[in-house]
Amino acid sequence: MIKVVRADITSLAVEAIVNAANETLLGGGGVDGAIHRAAGPELRQACQNIGGCPTGEARITPGFRLPATWVIHTVGPVWQGGDEGEPELLVACYKNSFDLALQNGVSTIAFPSISTGAYGYPIEAATGVAVGVMRSYEDRLKEIICCCFSDDDRKVYELTISATG
């Protein structure tokens, strides 16, 4: 089941949350910074031990002080107009995150809207990619949550899900 909520992803009691990280995995702005602050300094240390993550790939750490057991870090593409491989890289972010979740026995997962903040990916296009990949995994997980930062983003997710459902 795919569900849409407007919430602080760091407050969700799910098995895994996905972090829209940067390549260093050492925290940044937006959801990345919020997750690092809420998880505590242990998360930064775990991320330092990983040594970074290329765009499109994903890495997993414990959730430490978060309600979530795991944090799956993925690095979304920076929007450059759509002709520089951004859609394929965004698909890879979601697929690699789902694959890591399944490898670790996760059945409930929450995703932010990857790449739509500072990385500038248009929300409608990014949501289409996200929901398309989510549909291909929804029968393998108990619950997939699209955690939106704003009501406008929530509406885009709800429309996209209803149009594809």
Image: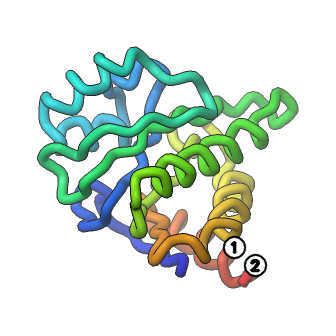
Q: Tell me: residue 54, above or below residue 110.
A: above
Q: Residues within 10 Å of mark 1 (few under 14, many from 20)?
A: some
The C terminus, quarter of image: bottom right
Q: Which residue is mark 2?
A: 164
Whether the residues at callouts 1 and 2 have beta carbons within 8 Å, the answer is yes
Residue 87 coordinates in the image, percent (x, y): 77, 42
> Viewer-proximal residue, 108 or 87?
108
Which residue is pictured at 82% across the width and 27% down the height? 84
Residue 62 coordinates in the image, percent (x, y): 25, 42
Indicate the quadrant where residue 92 lies. top right
Residue 98 coordinates in the image, percent (x, y): 55, 54
Residue 46 coordinates in the image, percent (x, y): 25, 26
Which residue is pictured at 18% across the width and 51% down the height? 66
* Amino acid identity at mark 2: Thr
Q: Tell me: residue 86, above or below residue 103.
A: above
Q: Tell me the mark number nearer the camera, choosing from 1 and 2.
A: 2
